[in-house]
Amino acid sequence: MLPVLQALQRLPEQTNLSAKYHPTSGYHYLLPDQPPPQNMFQEMQSHPLQEARETNVWYPFDGLGEWSLAKFLKLDWFKTREQLQFELKDELFFYMQQLPGHGPKWQSTKLKLKGYKNEQPIHLIWRDGLEVTKQLFANPVYANHMCYDPHRIYQGQERQFGEFWMSNDAWEIQDQLPKGATIIPIIAASDKTPVTRHTGGLEMHPLFLMIGNIQANVHMKATLYAWQCTAFMPIPTFIVNSDFQTLLRLHLWHKCMDLVCSNLKVTAHVGKYMVDPSARLRYCFTPLISHIADLPKQLMIACLLCNHIDPWDLIIFLREAKKLHLSGVHLPFWRNWRFCNPAKFLTPEILHTLHKFFFDHVLKWIKQVMGHELAIRFKNHHKCTGVCHFSGGVSHINQMTGQEHHDIQHTIVPMLWGMASPGFIHTVHAMIDFIYLAQNPLHTKSSITSMIQALQDFHDHKQAIIDTQAQKGKGGTKDNFFIPKLELMQSFACAIFNVGSLLQWTADISEHLLITHCKHPFERMSCQRDFILQIARILDREETIRLFDLYTLLSSSMSTPDQDPLINTIIIEDEEIASTETDSTLAWVSNVNPAAQLHLQGPRPVHNHFLKGIILDNAWIAFNVTVKADCSHLNASQLQSLYNLPDFMHALHLYATRNSCTLPDPDHVSFNTWLKFRIQLHSAFHTCRIMPSQQIHAEPPSSNFPRVDGDNDMTLPDVALYCSTGSYVAQIRAIFQPILPRGSHVQLPERLSQVLVYIQHFDFIVPGPEPSMGMWMPGRVIRRGSIIPLTDVTHVVEIILVYQGPLGKDINSGNSLEVFDNYFLNNFADKELYHSLSVISEN
């Protein structure tokens, strides 16, 4: 039983999907006179000491406490004070060597560039890239998250482009391989980072490898160990003229990459039999499909060949290379790697090409136009759950995290209203459109066309930026857009057709890996004589500890004699994928040994409200309120006073009348109220995947959120929602449920006994989006409200006020949603909503 392809996982009503698999891909084999293939954990079970581990899974350690002490996690040992079996460190290290599952061995190789001296010896710390690939490919943890076959998915007549397997390159590579061959796409990532903190800190180039068979929603999480650190490449200082320093380092880097990946290159040519997570033998080939890096590193990797100059005559060769804007490396590591083309495997990178471009250029243009008013608007922007509120503005920030880039992009377009010209706003809006469309996890030809058009709109209107003199350089105002990152955006559409969605190749992951996977071993050491050897040993032991931890958890689970949890759990297919936050290791262990998952660390799984929440008939949306209400048994007068809703009972009577219900005597009806609820949707792109729930507040008026209306009352600005009844925008004011006294002989009608919400309506000022903003403009009609069932809510949306020039001093983040009546419906609030509103606008 194989897992259902992620691209085909859809809700039942989506019947317009069709798929075509490559006809000669992904066979599995049984070789005569060979033992049955074994995946990684079956090999661990066949360890010579497995018989002893049938009674003590921690053998050769005496138990869990002693094993915890061996890992230098002493708390469990202090609970029992067991007598240790080892007294010396050498005995402990000997015990560690008896554990199963060591993983590919780390080693150190001393390198030298002939004819050039360096200040310190050059040591490459590495392990074989092919062995790392085999371990990842045989790991049963990923069995339900693997793909082996190129395929084409069609939605109606439009082909979809998502993961690599849905791209043109996957199909073309498979066409050139022997019948039945399986592609193991190699994905690499590297960057320079300091690995020590002491004086004269050591810098290295860590190399990470991952296989493209693992689904993107798993390998895009750094904490799931789908990425494996494979090498630490040195950055030495050569005793040469400074002009040659960079060139020699580039030569060395490519030489190190060549050594680490040599067996991968051989396998890409001739193939190799490997065992997959389901313990099936496959004939595999290993093409490099992506090397994730920023622009300077991509230039270092590309290093186009120069054949008419002797490369060893460095002075002449370097001079000619500079004329051609080449790096000067004539033997790149990828030169003899089959299917390897730097024009394709150097995939466009979201973090540096888009988000850093926005920060380095677009945001600076906006600061030039808006000045201090930009900081004021960000300070006074209403606060949203889960979104960074820039209480100090954004003008002073010199460095941001990726999440902060996202949060500014969410709101920057409506912030421009009233301060920038329509042409300037249109230009910024087009660039944000392009950034959002480029990050789609699933593309069609239509969405790619829209992305191309957004970039063209930017170029068509960019003169507005020059007209405002917002484009600045070192020499003052610039009248051109010679920006390399802007030029790279022209390649996005072609790259999506070739290698799939660009979101899966973002450097966010590698940037995080540099922190979580690289520096820990080096921080324990000082630069002593055997420093490099000690690092290699530490890396080996950490890998052994991680694998043995998982092995003991699985082996200690209860299983029947005829049922091996290590094999049978890999065919359990979840009907619902919680989200991109799902930890594949945690999910696998939870099927085998639910109690053991408490000992694992990983991303917090998304709570699935579709299991026990309030669900619509079509199971498209789920809601959740707490079992215990925040306020119980309020009478109508108390509720009206608490929430400042003088027309509450009138609205309730109208609701009952619309639904042909009879409202009991108000003196016998009381109300439970909640301060918040959660709404959970399926992804607009992968509709079988559940997105994290969103929290909506509806708290009573508070002095923390003042609003001055006609009656000088104080009201909390609640989150605006897009509701299904009449398809309007509304603001939630109260969440309540009518109840009758215990023992009452009267029964509330079904439409009255459910959870209800009191809302205040908005209406659209114009029939379509405002041209330069591309946003709908809802406005308050009246302050009176109405009541609808909670289940009529379909989306959470964000509204941002329509600024009319500079803000007054009486406006703040607490009342900015209350003192105005006209707003923009922010379609950039999140990518899911952006996609949904784009579809609505097109229709």
Image (spheres, grey):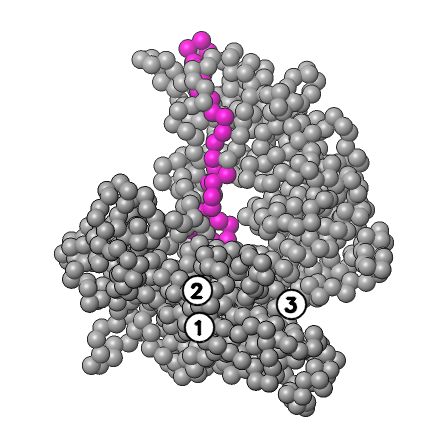
Q: Which residues are magenta?
A: 666-694
Q: Residue furthest top?
A: 667
Q: Which residue is mark 2?
A: 535
SS category of the residue bearing label 3? helix
How many residues crowd mark 1 within 10 Å: few (<14), some (14–19), many (20+)?
Answer: some
Q: Is residue 262 left or right of residue 204?
A: left
Q: Which residue is mark 3?
A: 296
Residue 312 lies, with reference to residue 477, above or below; the image says below
How many residues crowd mark 3 within 10 Å: few (<14), some (14–19), many (20+)?
Answer: few
Q: Are marks 2 and 1 in contact (CB under 8 Å)?
A: yes
SS category of the residue bearing label 2? helix
Q: Quadrant of residue 703?
A: top right
Q: Are marks 3 and 1 in contact (CB under 8 Å)?
A: no
Q: Is residue 444 visible?
A: no
Q: Is residue 818 visible?
A: yes
SS category of the residue bearing label 1? strand
Q: Is residue 370 left or right of residue 595?
A: right
Residue 704 lies, with reference to residue 421, above or below; the image says above
Q: Residue type at mark 3?
A: Pro
Q: Residue furthest left?
A: 561
Q: Are marks 3 and 2 in contact (CB under 8 Å)?
A: no
Reading the chain from its start, which is encountered first: label 3 or label 2?
3
Q: Which residue is mark 1?
A: 108
The image position of residue 276, as x and y in percent, is: 33, 68
Q: Is residue 199 left or right of residue 574?
A: right
